[in-house]
Image (spheres, grey):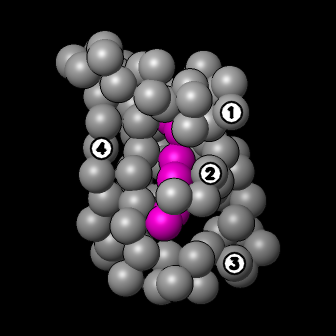
Amino acid sequence: MAEIKIYTKSWCPYCVSAKELLKSKNVSFIEIDIERQPEQRAEMIERAHGGITVPQIFINDDHIGGCDDLHALERDGKLDARLKA
């Protein structure tokens, strides 16, 4: 099973949407709330190649992008394969 990390903020509706999609797939993920762990923000930006918005989603260290990117993978029928890799 893939390792999934998602950088979030508690009040972000896009973060909630991305987490709901992942939960609907019955996969576990590591959530890093950059408000509660502000030291993780710099790591997120570096890993996301300058991405400063949340969520930032990684599957097996591959940068997926944000909520829209995650939902696009689902619409294209590619998310399940990425989650199982």
Callout 2 amino acid? His
Q: Residue at x 31, y 14 (%)?
A: 38
Q: Residues within 10 Å of mark 4 (few under 14, many from 20)?
A: some
Left or right of 17 in this view: 34: left
Contact between labelled residues 1 and 2, with CB atoms less than 8 Å apart = yes
Q: Earlier in the sequence, mark 2 or mark 1?
A: 1
The foreground one among 43 and 51 is: 43
Callout 1 amino acid? His
Q: Which mark is residue 31?
A: 4
Q: CA distance from mark 4 to mark 3?
A: 22 Å
Please report the bounds of the magenta region as a residue range. 55-60
Left or right of 73 in this view: 31: left
| Badge 4 element | strand
Residue that label 3 marks = 78
Q: CA distance from mark 1 to mark 4?
A: 19 Å
Single out the mark in the foreground, 2 or 4.
2
Single out the mark in the foreground, 1 or 4.
1
Residue that label 2 marks = 63
Q: CA distance from mark 2 to mark 1?
A: 9 Å
Q: Residue furthest right?
A: 76
Callout 4 amino acid? Glu
Q: CA distance from mark 2 to mark 3?
A: 15 Å
State whether residue 31 is above or below residue 72: above
The x and y percentages for residue 73 are: 70, 66
Q: Residue at x 48, y 85 (%)?
A: 84
Q: CA distance from mark 3 to mark 1?
A: 23 Å
Residue that label 1 marks = 49
